């Protein structure tokens, strides 16, 4: 938390919006998006690293949150444009004319001119924010209830979550989905009514919001895993059948964690996509959730700080390699261009971590902070007098 606070203050002081200008506005947005990815990685670590549910669909909830806020941003911005264009008409426009103009502007790209039912509350920011939380939570609740009550576990559950994500992505690719198909929602970086505010300032606002969300998410996850509830979900991860035989409602615990992490992922999406500027069905494709699992594995699952480290490191490296900033390597007979080879390098890194460092980068932190057993000098170490005296303690 201290590192996050210092990082936020440092970026703020060095940003263009603050005035110094060492860090560009585009890089501030990249850092803000990275913090959002760290938040969704926390959710993934809670559901997988602590509860043992390898979900390959949490980026779908992330995308749903982005679509929810994107609908309001597109509606509100288009409403201003349409109202200004109709203001010059001889007669004042009616609310219906404005609504028709907004629909034509938004859906003309897919050959439609009417609002689908899914846009019923797109005019209201509070309702869209509520939908951004409730819709992913409800989907996760229904899906989890059906899966967990049927005792689906392991790789079969992972396949089901991946199938859910693929089905959602394929649906959103259709033009009649009500969300502009493959075009997605664009121009989300422009906040309605704040055209006079420079992007350097807006990027700082979202950066601060992302840092605050990550801090609150980290505190929430830490609180969950530190008490009895955390002990139970770790036991479910290690031996689900035994926990069930002890009388704990395993399905209820798993359903709660699955639903909560879906909501956390959606909140991360709400903050991410206004900084990205666009959301489309490709963001919900199963490969995105696989990348999320790779981040957590490299960082060290079962360690909240490991998930943050993995997401931050891999996402920033991905931006550097795929953005053409990494120098190509000329081998004489072949030139390695990182734009093409980055995903292969990431896959090899995942395999290497799985085989040789299963604790991930977080394991290095464990080694650094590892404490030795207390030197009791022959004191009783058990409930009985004389238990584990000096000789046993030294062993």
Image: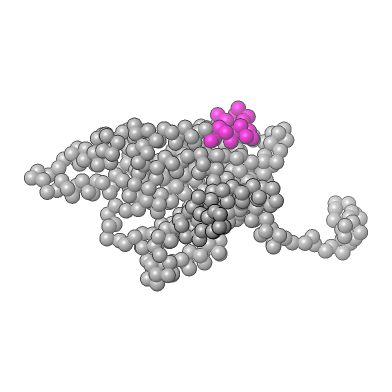
Image quadrant assignment for residue 91: top left
Image quadrant assignment for residue 113: top left
Q: Is residue 214 above or below residue 249?
A: below
Q: Is residue 24 visible?
A: yes
Q: Is residue 76 left or right of residue 219?
A: left
Q: Is residue 381 left or right of residue 51?
A: right
Q: Is residue 161 above or below residue 72?
A: above
Image location (x, y in percent) of residue 172: 40, 35
Image location (x, y in percent) of residue 337: 51, 54
Image location (x, y in percent) of residue 152: 62, 30
Magenta stretch, main secondary structure, is: helix
Q: Is residue 35 visible?
A: no
**Residue at (43%, 33%) from the top-left corner?**
170
**Residue at (40%, 60%) from the top-left corner?**
26
Image location (x, y in percent) of residue 198: 31, 62
Magenta stretch contains residue 221: no
Magenta stretch contains residue 147: yes
Q: Magenta part of the protein: which range? A: 146-162
Q: How many marks?
A: 0
Q: Is residue 234 left or right of residue 33?
A: right
**Residue placed furthest toward the top:** 150
């Amino acid at each position: 938390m201290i590192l996050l606070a210092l990082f936020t203050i440092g970026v703020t002081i060095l940003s263009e919006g603050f005035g110094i200008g060492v860090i560009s506005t585009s890089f501030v947005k990249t850092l803000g998006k990275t913090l959002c990815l760290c938040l969704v990685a926390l959710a993934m670590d809670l559901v997988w690293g602590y509860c043992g549910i390898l979900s390959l669909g949490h980026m779908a909830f992330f995308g749903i949150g982005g679509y929810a806020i994107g609908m309001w941003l597109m509606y509100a911005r288009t409403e201003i444009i349409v109202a200004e264009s109709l203001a010059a008409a001889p007669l004042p426009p009616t609310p219906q004319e404005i609504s028709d103009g907004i629909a034509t502007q938004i859906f003309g790209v897919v050959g439609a001119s009417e609002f689908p039912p899914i846009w019923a509350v797109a005019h209201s920011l509070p309702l869209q924010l509520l939908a951004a939380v409730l819709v992913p939570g409800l989907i996760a609740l229904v899906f989890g209830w059906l899966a967990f009550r049927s005792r689906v576990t392991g790789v079969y559950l992972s396949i089901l979550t991946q199938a859910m994500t693929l089905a959602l992505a394929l649906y959103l690719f259709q033009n009649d989905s009500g969300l502009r198909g493959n075009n997605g929602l664009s121009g989300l970086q422009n906040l309605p009514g704040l055209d006079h505010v420079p992007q350097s300032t807006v990027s700082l606002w979202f950066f601060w919001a992302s840092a605050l969300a990550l801090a609150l998410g980290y505190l929430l996850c830490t609180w969950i895993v530190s008490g009895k509830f955390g002990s139970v979900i770790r036991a479910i991860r290690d031996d689900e059948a035994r926990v069930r035989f002890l009388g704990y409602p395993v399905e209820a615990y798993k359903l709660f964690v699955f639903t909560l992490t879906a909501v956390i992922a959606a909140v991360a999406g709400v903050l991410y996509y206004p900084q990205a500027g666009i959301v489309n069905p490709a963001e919900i494709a199963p490969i995105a959730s696989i990348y999320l699992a790779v981040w957590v594995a490299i960082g060290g699952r079962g360690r909240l700080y490991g998930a943050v480290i993995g997401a931050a490191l891999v996402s920033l490296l991905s931006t550097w390699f795929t953005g053409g900033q990494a120098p190509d390597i000329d081998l004489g007979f072949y030139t390695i261009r990182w734009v093409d080879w980055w995903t292969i390098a990431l896959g090899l890194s995942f395999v290497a971590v799985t085989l040789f460092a299963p604790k991930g980068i977080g394991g290095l932190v464990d080694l650094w902070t590892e404490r030795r057993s207390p030197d009791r000098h022959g004191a009783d170490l058990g409930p009985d007098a004389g238990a584990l005296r000096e000789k046993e303690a030294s062993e």
